[in-house]
């Protein structure tokens, strides 16, 4: 058995910090599941407070080129980079009813070029606009501070497809 996957149910678990190591972890497990269940959508269970935005975009890029759809279910929280990964799933996107998403402005690093930081913020904004029913002005306003969204509101904003209930 490979850590972090349930091959019989075609599930992968993504928890903890999103780091540069998470990209290879994600790709290797997705590839393993595709190899063993070629015609089935992969479901990723996510519970993460986020992390490195570059790594998040690496995972998003890989989901977009993967030969099968990748759905994501949030149990707990998907914040920052993890929230961006969740809303960019290529399959069904769901949240348990007590889960939360959180988006925030990118943290400014004094050592990073100001134009690069603007570009990164625009990439985040473009993703949020494309994946929701809200415009750039709305998201620019909300990203001035931490913006928490519960499952029901995430559904209303079309960030997810459905709320899981019990």
Image (cartoon, rainbow, N blue to C red):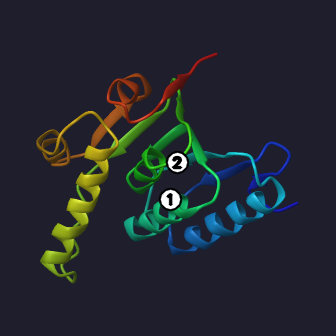
Quadrant of the rendering where the N terminus is positioned: bottom right
| Residue 67: % across, % down | 63, 59
Q: Residue furthest top?
A: 166
- Residue corresponding to mark 2: 90
Using the image as rendered, state which of residue 83 and residue 42 is in the foreground.
42
| Residue 14: % across, % down | 61, 53
In the rendered structure, the answer to whether residue 141 lies left or right of residue 16 reads: left
Residue 24 location, quadrant: bottom right
In the rendered structure, the answer to whether residue 1 lies left or right of residue 81 reads: right
Disc nearer the start of the sequence (1/2): 1
Quadrant of the rendering where the C terminus is positioned: top right
* Residue at 53% over, 33% down: 94
* Residue at 53% over, 65% down: 62
Residue 8, compared with residue 118, is above or below; it is above
Mark 1, Cα crowd under 10 Å, few <14 / some 14-19 / many 20+, is some
Using the image as rendered, state which of residue 110 and residue 54 is in the foreground.
54
Q: Secondary structure at mark 1?
A: helix
Mark 1–mark 2 contact, CB under 8 Å?
A: yes
| Residue 141: % across, % down | 12, 43
Q: Secondary structure at mark 2?
A: loop
* Residue at 41% over, 56% down: 81
| Residue 161: % across, % down | 48, 30
Numbered badge on residue 64: 1
In the rendered structure, the answer to whether residue 166 lies left or right of residue 111 reads: right
């Amino acid at each position: 058995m490979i850590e972090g996957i349930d091959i019989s149910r075609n599930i992968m678990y993504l928890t903890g910090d999103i780091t540069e190591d998470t990209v290879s972890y994600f790709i290797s497990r997705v590839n393993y599941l595709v190899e063993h269940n070629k015609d089935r959508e992969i479901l990723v269970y996510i519970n993460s407070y986020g992390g490195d935005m570059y790594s998040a975009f690496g995972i998003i890029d890989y989901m977009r080129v993967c030969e099968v759809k990748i759905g994501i279910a949030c149990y707990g929280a998907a914040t920052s980079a993890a929230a961006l990964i969740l809303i960019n799933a290529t399959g069904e996107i769901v949240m348990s009813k007590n889960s939360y998403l959180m988006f925030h402005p990118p943290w400014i690093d004094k050592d990073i070029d100001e134009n690069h930081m603007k570009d990164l913020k625009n990439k985040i904004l473009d993703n949020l606009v494309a994946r929701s029913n809200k415009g750039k002005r709305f998201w620019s306003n909300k990203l001035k501070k931490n913006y928490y969204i519960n499952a029901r509101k995430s559904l209303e904003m079309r960030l997810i497809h459905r709320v899981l209930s019990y």
